[in-house]
């Protein structure tokens, strides 16, 4: 199935962190947890095998809070948060990708759902 899905390149602002997301993005999430509401990102969830970090592992700082399940990564240089990862509802590793960090991706027409991350 991964073969038919489009590949979206993404990066932080300074370019130290580069990644690819293979997904058909049909909708976005806005999470109301204390971290995401401050960061203001629009995200999409993706299983681990559809996300590839191409470069920048050393450029990322790992920030955790609360129950410390989710890794909220950000670039040490420019401060942008391109993605985070943690266990999904089934316990499998999931990525939450900041669609604002995807290159040439128009998210303005996509429906936005609200994700109750604050309740987790
Ligand atoms: Zn950066």
Image: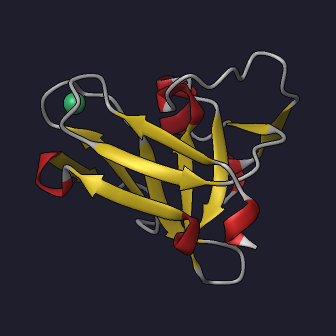
For the C terminus, the quadrant is bottom right
What residue is at 32 percent from the left and 29 percent from the top? 80
Locate residue 66, reporting x and y percent.
44, 57
Residue 63 seen in the current view: no
Q: In this view, does 94 lie above or below 59?
A: below
* Image position of 35 (left or right of 105): left
Locate residue 78, reporting x and y percent.
20, 24
Residue 43 found in image quarter: top right
What residue is at 60 percent from the left and 41 percent from the top? 33
What residue is at 76 percent from the left and 73 percent from the top? 1
* Image position of 81 (left or right of 9): left
Q: Which residue lies furthest to the front in this view?
A: 3
Residue 8 seen in the current view: yes
Locate residue 11, reporting x and y percent.
36, 35
* Image position of 15 (left or right of 21): left
Q: Is residue 54 above or below residue 27?
A: below
* Image position of 77 (left or right of 63): left
Ligand 1 quadrant in view? top left
What residue is at 54 percent from the left and 60 percent from the top? 95
Q: Is residue 30 above or below residue 69?
A: above
Residue 108 found in image quarter: top right
Closest to the observer: 64 or 96?
96
How many numbered marks, from 0 up?
A: 0
What colouring method underlies this structural image? secondary structure
Locate residue 25, reporting x and y percent.
75, 44
Q: Which residue lies furthest to the bottom in this view?
A: 91
């Amino acid at each position: 199935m991964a073969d038919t899905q489009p590949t979206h390149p993404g990066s932080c602002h300074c370019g130290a962190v580069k990644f690819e997301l293979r997904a058909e993005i049909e909708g976005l999430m806005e999470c109301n947890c204390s971290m995401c509401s401050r960061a203001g990102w629009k995200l999409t969830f993706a299983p681990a095998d559809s996300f590839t970090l191409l470069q920048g592992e050393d450029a990322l700082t790992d920030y955790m809070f609360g129950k410390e399940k989710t890794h909220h990564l950000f670039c040490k240089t420019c401060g942008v948060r391109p993605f985070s990862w943690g266990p999904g509802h089934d316990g499998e590793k999931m990525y939450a990708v900041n669609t604002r960090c995807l290159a040439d991706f128009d998210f303005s027409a996509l429906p936005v759902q609200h994700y109750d991350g604050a309740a987790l």
